């Protein structure tokens, strides 16, 4: 429903532009999307790309998840700070049980990016594509078991700022 959802809609648009067939499911209602997520959902709808709402009234599409070659997780991002409730809990449990391969956008949904704690349930990713730096929680608590392979993507943060952030990291973990 927030920024990570917006990133998921951007992934869907790029897949469509590349000619890769994909289906997009929104856990919740489009009318409740926030900022970037709302903008990117509207872009998909304007180009006639279907976004199927799932949740309380519509079950998580078990068959669709089980038959997909790859499931992209963009349900929750680093802003999550509460126990995961329905319908999100069921969506994550379905992904964990049925998906063949999972790519998490920025962080697996349900993982605390700082502590590596899990908010009740967490996506178990095969790969996590994260932005600028890996999160500290990837290396703590449950993090190592949830993230799979880490791919760090540069999103244009100036080198000066990255170097400053690197200088504040522990000597055991530095990011480039």
Image (tube, helix red, strand yellow):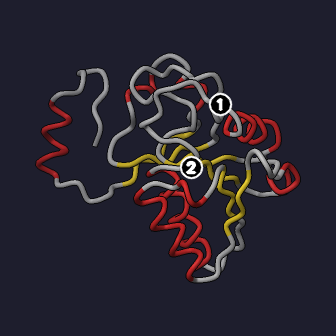
Q: Secondary structure beneath disc 1?
A: loop
- Residue beneath label 1, please? 85
How far apart are labels 1 and 2 at the CA level?
A: 16 Å
Q: Is residue 173 left or right of residue 94?
A: left
- Residue beneath label 2, please? 74
CB atoms at circles 1 and 2 under 8 Å apart? no
Residue 76, position as x, y percentages in the image: 53, 42
Q: Secondary structure beneath disc 2?
A: loop
Seen at 13% across and 38% down, the residue is: 164
Seen at 57% across and 46% down, the residue is: 104
Seen at 72% across and 47% down, the residue is: 101
Q: Is residue 27 left or right of residue 56?
A: left
Disc number placed over residue 20 in the picture, else none: none
Q: Is residue 52 left or right of residue 153?
A: right
Q: Is residue 42 left or right of residue 161?
A: right
Residue 163, position as x, y percentages in the image: 15, 41
Sequence-first tag of 1 and 2: 2
Front in this rendered view, residue 70 or 51:
51
Location of the C terminus (image quadrant):
top left
Residue 161, position as x, y percentages in the image: 14, 46
């Amino acid at each position: 429903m927030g920024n990570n959802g917006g990133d998921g809609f951007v992934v869907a648009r790029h897949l469509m532009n590349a000619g890769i067939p994909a289906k997009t499911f929104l856990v919740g209602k489009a009318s409740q999307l926030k900022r970037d997520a709302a903008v990117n959902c509207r872009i998909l709808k304007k180009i006639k790309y279907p976004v199927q709402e799932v949740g309380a009234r519509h079950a998580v599409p078990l068959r669709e998840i089980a038959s997909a070659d790859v499931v992209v997780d963009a349900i929750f991002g680093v802003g999550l700070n509460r126990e995961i409730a329905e319908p999100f809990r069921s969506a994550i449990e379905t992904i964990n049980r049925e998906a063949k391969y999972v790519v998490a956008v920025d962080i697996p949904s349900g993982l605390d990016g700082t502590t590596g704690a899990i908010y009740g349930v967490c996506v178990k990713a095969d790969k996590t594509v994260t932005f600028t730096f890996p999160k500290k929680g990837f290396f703590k608590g449950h993090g190592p078991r949830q993230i799979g392979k880490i791919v760090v993507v540069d999103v244009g943060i100036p080198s000066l700022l990255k170097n400053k952030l690197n200088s504040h990291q522990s000597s055991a973990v530095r990011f480039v």
